[in-house]
Image (cartoon, grey):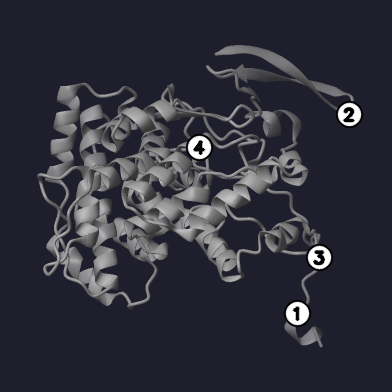
Amino acid sequence: MSENHAILTIKDQTYELPLIEGSEGDKAMDIRTLLKDTGYITLDSGYMNTGSCKSAITFVDGQKGILNYRGYAIDELAERCSFVEVVYLLLIGELPTREQLKNFRELMAKHALIHEDMIHFFDHFPPNASPMSILSTMVNTLCNFYPELTADTDDALLSVAARLISKVRTIAAFSYKKSIGHPLVYPRYDLSYCGNFLNMMFDKPVRPYVVKPELVATLNKLLILHADHEQNCSTSTVRLVGSAGVNLYASISAGISALWGPLHGGANQAVIKMLEAIHHDNNDFEKYIKKAKDPNDPFLLSGFGHRVYKTFDPRATIIKEACEQTLKALNVDDPLLEIAEKLEEIARNDDYFIKRNLYPNVDFYSGIIYRAMGIPTDMFTVMFAMGRLPGWIAHWQEMIQDTKDRKIGRPRQIYTGAKKRKFVPFDERG
């Protein structure tokens, strides 16, 4: 890290603020002593200009459309790695050797089951319970059945991470089966991580499911693309909750709840609803383009634009290609894909969208892929959570290990309420 100083002038007093530069050139002013030195704080709604930590996990450059995990470009990882390899990379910092990958896969297979007593919990959720609500509750409950991280070593982290990542996949599949009244399908030792999930979701006693390699490859790719994305809302939530000293399971449960929001993990559901609305409206593209441009119309084109990326989301290009390949492999002709491609074409050639950097993001095509796989819309955000889980764990661990700078999260505020006033006794209030 290189370091010099910036000069801050408040009235007639000057202060030196250290300047910090990250390994990829991202720059920051260190204001950690600002309140102590000046009596001022910064006001930054949504933390759009505030760095909450230093991290060695993921690098995002929104201006250039770059996303790297531990220094590796997202397109290379999505094309050449399995999800389990990327999990190991995010947790440990290096891609696994053959032996390390074999051992980690065996560890995940060993922990794939959930305690039988936990299965009874599913019976007490109402039939229309949100899968994200179920997932958050069940993950929080895991701390009562399984020990949390007790040793600060790579082996200890891998063991707990393998348990959590493997069991979340099982919980997700079980919640779906319970919601449709089908018998549970237990994980199999002979199937891969993604193959196991698809089998637990769709296998039936009366109709055995055949795990297709094409779908396994696509699901691997989708989970990799969602595995981490720097300090987004849910990851920041995991860090903030974890900073209070709670266990990993509770921190992840909080992250799941944050991801549940329609402005975060629920975006691909919104895309599908939008595409279906256009389809049911006789594919009237112009109508919806006009609505999106109308400043007095609350309608927004879902799946376009990103708070970080000011150019094309690098994940969107990979997902679009995967979408086309998957539908072709399954021989599925989804009219929503045609609508999505038409909307993208219009947006790419319209000055209104170009000037506002409104390009398709990672959510735009992912829902179409999940539909083709047979995954229902209300499970889309659960799929996102499965993918993001290793990133959450890696950030939680990084936060815990940062003994030098770690502090309980406690944002400041600018108070705008009433000034101190005299208390009025009850009998005098009229």
Q: How crowded is mark 4: few (under 14 residues within 10 Å), some or many (20 or more)?
A: some
Distance CA(mark 4)–CA(mark 1): 65 Å
Callout 2–callout 4 Cβ contact below 8 Å: no
Distance CA(mark 2)–CA(mark 1): 43 Å
User: Which residue is at a point 64% across and 25% down the rendered structure image?
Assistant: 30
Q: Where is residue 127 in the image (x, y as percent from the top left)?
A: 33, 77
Q: Can you say whether 18 is above or below 185 in the image?
A: above
Residue 162 visible in this rendered orientation of the protein:
yes
Q: What element carries label 4?
A: helix
Q: Position of residue 294 (x, y in %)?
A: 79, 59
N-term mark: 4 or 3: 4
Mark 2 is on which residue type? Answer: Lys
Q: Is mark 3 on a helix, strand or loop?
A: loop
- Which residue is identified by label 4? 317
Which tag is nearer the camera, tag 2 or tag 1?
A: 2
Mark 4 is on which residue type? Answer: Thr
Residue 11, numbered circle: 2
Residue 33, numbered circle: none
User: Which residue is at a point 29% across and 47% down the rendered structure image?
Assistant: 215
Which tag is nearer the camera, tag 4 or tag 3?
A: 4
Which tag is nearer the camera, tag 4 or tag 1?
A: 4
Q: Residues within 10 Å of mark 1 (few under 14, many from 20)?
A: few
Q: Nearer the viewer, residue 224 or 334?
A: 334
Distance CA(mark 2)–CA(mark 4): 49 Å
- Which residue is identified by label 1? 425
Distance CA(mark 1)–CA(mark 3): 13 Å
Mark count? 4
Which tag is nearer the camera, tag 3 or tag 2?
A: 2
Q: Position of residue 86 (x, y in %)?
A: 32, 32
User: Which residue is at a point 42% across and 42% down the rendered structure image?
Assistant: 226
Distance CA(mark 3)–CA(mark 2): 30 Å
- Which residue is identified by label 3? 421
